[in-house]
Each structure stands twice: as C-alpha cells, then as structure tokens.
Amino acid sequence: MTSSQNDRERVSTNIIVENQFETAANLIGLDPSMQLLLKTPFRTVSVEVAIRMDDGRLEVFNGYRVQHNGARGPCKGGVRYHPEADEQEIIGLATTMTWKTALLDIPFGGAKGGVQVKARDLSKRELEAITRQFTRRIALLLGPYRDIPAPDMNTNQQTMAWMLDEYSAKYGYTPAAVTGKPVALGGSLGREEATGRGVMLIMKNYSRDFGIPIKDARVVIQGFGNVGAHLALFLHELGAKIVAASDVYGGLHNEDGLDIPALFEHTYKQHKPVAEFDGGDKLINPDDVIWNIPCEWLVPAALGSVITKEKNANTIDCKVVVEAANSPITPIGDKILEARNIQVLPDFLVNAGGVVVSYFEWTQNLQQEPWTLEQVNSGLERKMNTAYEVVRDLADDKGVPWRTAALAIALQRVADAEALRGGR
Ligand code: GLU
C-alpha cells in the first residue's frame, strides 16, 4: 500500500450519497417526510461469517446485507468483498442501487451486501466457505421477489454459482434468486461485460451530443477489474487511445495508447497485474500520478472516494470524469470539478449496465426462456440511451449538474411508488 492510499482522506460512500440527496430533493420539492422515508434504509442486517482458514485457524468476518428501498420492486444489488465494506459503506451503496434501478426504470429497489475481507489474500476454498456461510446467514432475506444478489467488487460468476447452490439447497432450485451467474447455470449472455458496455454507451451518447470525440481521444482508466477492462476493450474498438491504466498493484502509461486486447488477455484472462504487462512505462505510485495524466476522458473504475480536494480535484486534467465506480468523488471534490467546468457523468447512470442486464437475466430465469446476445445488447442500449436522454434533458432544462438531474428523476419515481403504496 502506498502512503497516499493510507491518507487518501476517504469519505464513506454513505456520506457522499447523503450529501447529494438534499439538492436533488429540493429541486423536485420533495416534502420532508418523504425525504426522511427515502433516506432511511428499510433493513440493515449484520452477520457473523466464521470460517476455518486453510491453516486451521478460525477467522470471523463481518458480513452485511442492506435493503435500502423496495417500493418499485424486489431489492437488487451486488455483494462485494473488501476491507472497506463496512456497514456505512454498504448502506451508501444500497442507496445508490435504489436510485440506479429507478433511473433505468427497471422494476427493482436497491440493496447491497458485503463481507469485510481482503479477498485477494484468500484461497479459492476460503472464498467458497465465506460465500456459502454468508449466503446461509442472509438467505431468509433473499428470494426472486424479495432481494436478488449479484456480483460486485471481488466477486464474480463463481461466487454467484456458490450463492445459488446454497440458496437452492434451502429453498429448491431457484435460478432467479441470483444474477450474474455463469451461463451454464442460467446466467445471461452479455452479463459479464454489461457494465463496461453500458459505460461505453453513455460515453458515446455524450460524445455525440457535446462534441468530445472518442476516436483518437486519450482515456485514463483507474481500476482494471471487470468494469475497467471491458470498458477499455469497447473504447479501443471505437478507436480511443487508453493512455494509462492501473489496478491495485500498479499502473502503466503509454502516450501512444496501450495495446488493450493484449492487456485484456494479460489481466482479465491470465489474472496478472497491469504493471507486469510489457508495453508502457510503469507508474510509480499510480494512486498519485494516474490522476494527473492529461486526457479527454478520465474514468475512475475502482473504489469510492478517490477524487478529493486534498489529492487531485484541483489538478486533474481532463474534459469529462466518467464515474464507472460508485461514489469516486467526494462532495468537496465534486464542487471543485464543477467550478473548473469539468463535466461529471454520475455513477448511477454510467455504471447501470450491469444491473440492467441482471434484470434481463432475472426475466429470462422467471420465464425459463433464454435471450440471444443480440436481444440483450439491444435491450441494454435502449435502456441506457433512454436514461441518458432524460438526464441530459433535465440537466439542460434546469441548469443543474447531471448528478442532481439524475437523482431528481430517480427520487421522483421512488417517491411516487411510495406514495401510491401508502400504508403509513
Ligand atoms: N454490482 C453491480 C452494481 O453495483 C450490479 C448489481 C446487480 O446486477 O444487481 O450495479
């Protein structure tokens, strides 16, 4: 860990998310009691995940599942394995899922889960044991019409296969109980790359409307996991130059553009660190320097709270920040970027492609009717384009930042559903 990671002034996702709420709520004149209702998570569950490690020791980890709001449909959201995935972090991420599903107009509410663990130190057997026990502990909250988990940071198709197996052992075969599954277990074609594809689609729309090209443009991607790596591939296909990329181990810089198909093979397929790829200059202290590399499009695609006043908001040198990660910018960082006229495309619009295709997966499972890749991709494109257009138009109409516009739309939809349900 570099020194800058130690003191990177981390602001919890929940604080970031809460901070954005009021401006949007005021824009639509949301009454105070509805504001209170929409701010408060519906259910927050904390569980003990105690497993036997490979060396025989017993370890106990904290696990969480937060269901933020279910007015528009079953709660939906990923499960992440990360030391920073504490209760406040998961509440913030669950809240973001409520706004994301509402903005994309898919019939879900918002949830998130997590286990506070350093996943990359664990063996496959340990990961499986954690996943199975975590699933057993929260199984009574789950179900295709209650709450549907999916992958997130440091979890993947295999994690979902284990979750499905545990859930089905208890309740019978229920493929719609989890999304992001392997295709062989009822997963959807196109789900794995859906978040990256969705980010690319939002960038393409913005590029067309605001005259910032993608072809030959310089792109910096911080985070090269599922989202960053797939996005890099899509942008490369559109002719962009990915001039820098980084992961938790290090980073690479190449002004002529990195060889993305080869880097994808190296990282995503062979599971090797970005910096071990031959084809660019290694970044020393990537967490500090990657932010100052000049580019047109800057894409944080990893953890939250990485663009801050203290660190880089005053110095980053780009035209657009594309929030592929959740809550990558602190509230003060956001204000600085706004004052500097750097456009920010907000997380719950930009990275919604994953949950959109999760929705397609869920419907395929309920109907036992698989879709073609073409159906999935064209459905995703339609959903992303529509959400993009409503946000663009409201931001333009009201003269507010895109984040405020996006949140206002989402809040109104959830508030309408809550009001219609009544009962309070
Ligand atoms: N973890 C992804 C997200 O944050 C996907 C969630 C899902 O597919 O339910 O949007």
Image (cartoon, rainbow, N blue to C red):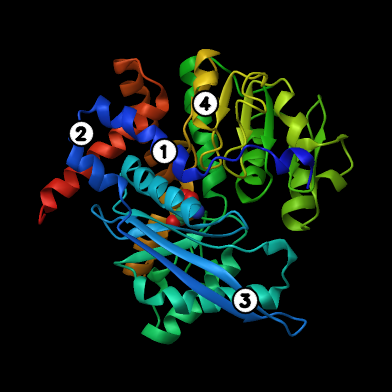
Instruction: Pick whichever of labels 4 and 1 is earlier in the sequence.
Output: 4
Q: Is residue 302 left or right of residue 93?
A: right
CA distance for labels 3 and 2: 44 Å
- The residue that appears at 49% across and 16% down in the rendered structure is 210
Q: Is residue 393 left or right of residue 212?
A: left
Q: Are marks 2 and 1 in contact (CB under 8 Å)?
A: no
Badge 2 element: loop
Kindly identify which residue carries mark 1: 384
Q: Amino acid at mark 3?
A: Glu
x and y, in percent, of residue 83 in the image:
63, 58
Which is closer to the viewer, label 1 or label 3? Answer: 3
x and y, in percent, of residue 2 in the image:
79, 43
Instruction: Pick whichever of labels 1 and 3 is earlier in the sequence.
Output: 3
Q: Amino acid at mark 1?
A: Met
Instruction: Pick whichever of labels 3 and 2 is earlier in the sequence.
Output: 2
Badge 4 element: helix
Kindly identify which residue carries mark 2: 30
Q: Is residue 354 left or right of residue 260?
A: left
x and y, in percent, of residue 377 in the image:
47, 47
CA distance for labels 1 and 3: 34 Å
Instruction: Pick whichever of labels 2 and 4 is earlier in the sequence.
Output: 2
CA distance for labels 4 and 3: 39 Å
Q: Amino acid at mark 2?
A: Leu
* Pointer 2 residue Cβ closer than 8 Å to ligand 1: no
Which is closer to the viewer, label 2 or label 1? Answer: 2
Instruction: Pick whichever of labels 4 and 3 is earlier in the sequence.
Output: 3
- The reply to whether residue 370 is visible in this rendering is no
Badge 3 element: helix
Which is closer to the viewer, label 2 or label 4? Answer: 4
